[in-house]
């Protein structure tokens, strides 16, 4: 990726925001409703984990290119 540094930072923040939304909607939201759906909790947890890892990866790649 040869994106400018601010663009990479924005992509990382967007990815982390998506992870937080998924976690809040599917995992934390299930705590407050009476019917618990295990599949929704699992999808939310895995989805948030994937987007969080993607955000960390983007920052890591950005730092690698900043050193060059």
Image (cartoon, rainbow, N blue to C red):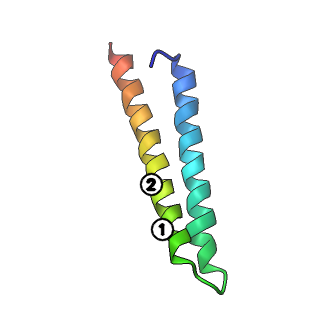
Q: Examine the rendered structure and indicate whether residue 22 appears above or below residue 4.
A: below
**Residue 49, quarter of the rendered image:** bottom left
Q: Residue at x 59, y 48 (%)?
A: 18
Residue 11 x/y as whole percent:
55, 32
2 vs 59: above or below:
above
Mark carried by residue 49: 2
How would you rate the neighbour count of disc 1 (Cα within 10 Å): few for under 14, some for 14-19, many for 20 or more?
some
Instruction: Name the residue beneath numbered marker 1.
Output: 42
> Which dot, 1 or 2, sits closer to the camera?
1
Question: Whole-Å distance between the Cαs marked 1 and 2?
Answer: 11 Å
Query: Which quadrant: the N terminus?
Result: top left
Q: Residue at x 59, y 66 (%)?
A: 26
User: In the image, 67: left or right of 18?
Assistant: left
Q: Position of residue 17 (x, y in %)?
A: 59, 47
Residue 54: which numbered mark, if any?
none
Place of residue 57 in the rendered image (x, y in percent of width and height, measured from the top left): 39, 37
Residue 46, how many percent across, how many down? 45, 59
In which quadrant will I find the C terminus?
A: top left
């Amino acid at each position: 990726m040869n994106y400018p540094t601010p663009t990479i930072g924005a992509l990382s923040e967007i990815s982390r925001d998506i992870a937080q939304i998924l976690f809040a909607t599917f995992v934390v939201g299930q705590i407050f409703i009476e019917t618990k759906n295990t599949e929704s909790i699992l999808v939310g947890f895995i989805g948030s984990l994937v987007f969080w890892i993607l955000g960390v990866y983007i920052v890591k790649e950005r730092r690698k290119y900043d050193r060059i």
